[in-house]
Amino acid sequence: MSEHSKGRMICLEGGEGAGKSTALERVRDWLERRGRKTLVTREPGGTPAAEKIRKLLLDPQTGDIDPMTELLLMFAARRENVVDRIRPALAEGVDVICDRFTDASYAYQGGGRELGPTPVDLLAGLVHPGLTPDLVLVLDVPVEIGLERIKQRRGGPDRFEGGRKAFLERVRNAYLDRARAHPDRYVVVDASSDIEHVGAAIRATLENRLG
Ligand SMILES: Nc1ncnc2c1ncn2[C@@H]1O[C@H](COP(=O)(O)OP(=O)(O)OP(=O)(O)O)[C@@H](O)[C@H]1O
Ligand SMILES: [Mg+2]
């Protein structure tokens, strides 16, 4: 548990269409049934200013930007969300459920864009010192399955979904490497089975880790 607060921080991570937002609702239900107050947030985003940065980052019309610029924008949005919403909630004893957080930067900018972990480590230390998720659920699914799941979405792929397969494979592997390196806080959930099976695996993980 984060030493600075009573609230717990639970993050949903994984590639495009892995089922993070679906899983997030399961996590929220599980906590609220146990009488916990929750705050749900997503990254990049979470505050009005951070949502504007999200638009810039996800819009295919933004085109290619330097990977470090992309990382800095992610952390600029994150800083707003941490200061405005996440830390105050945790301090009040509210459990925070985050649809992506800094692990996504390790996966997408560190792995996918090949910046490696060092700049992410540095920025995490600057932007949210001492704040580490209590539990990270990595929803793991083959890249093709995830992309297939989100194909029907209106408006076409965003800047990340439209990335090359090799990029998305690096993202997936970076998540798995990170989960292997920190088994105390990370749980990899096989998200390739149907929604009910994945939901059951998530509940079992919550019982095991937070129950
Ligand atoms: N286990 C599953 N099996 C089949 N379909 C699923 C499963 N989980 C989620 N879906 C469906 O796949 C689509 C993507 O799911 P969801 O939005 O939860 O993924 P996500 O990881 O949040 O995606 P994104 O990366 O776009 O945010 C939704 O239509 C959802 O209903
Ligand atoms: Mg989602």
Image (cartoon, rainbow, N blue to C red):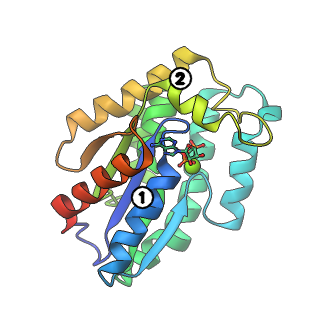
Q: Upstream in the sequence, badge 2 or badge 1?
A: 1
Question: Which amino acid, by three-letter code, is at mark 2?
Answer: Glu
Residue 117 visible somewhere in the drawing: no
Image mark for residue 128: 1
Residue 49 spot, x, y in % from top left: 71, 62
Q: Quadrant of residue 92?
A: bottom left
Residue 13 visible somewhere in the drawing: yes
Q: Quadrant of residue 159?
A: top right
Residues at marks 2 and 1, CA–CA distance in whole angstroms: 33 Å
Instruction: Tell me the residue at 28%/78% (across/down).
Output: 6
Whether residue 29 is situated above or below residue 184 in the rendered picture = below
Residue 11 spot, x, y in % from top left: 39, 55
Is ligand 2 within 8 Å of the beta carbon of the residue shown at mark 1?
no
Residue 167 spot, x, y in % from top left: 54, 20
Viewer-nearest residue: 112 or 119: 112
Whether residue 111 is situated above or below residue 186 in the rendered picture = above
Instruction: Tell me the residue at 48%/49% (across/down).
Output: 20
Q: Secondary structure at mark 1?
A: loop
- Is 170 situated left or right of 161 in this image? left
- Is 49 situated left or right of 118 in this image? right
Which residue is denoted by mark 2 in the rendering? 144
Instruction: Tell me the residue at 67%/33% (across/down).
Output: 151
Viewer-nearest residue: 62 or 192: 192
Question: Which amino acid, by three-letter code, is at mark 1?
Answer: His
Residue 131 spot, x, y in % from top left: 34, 60
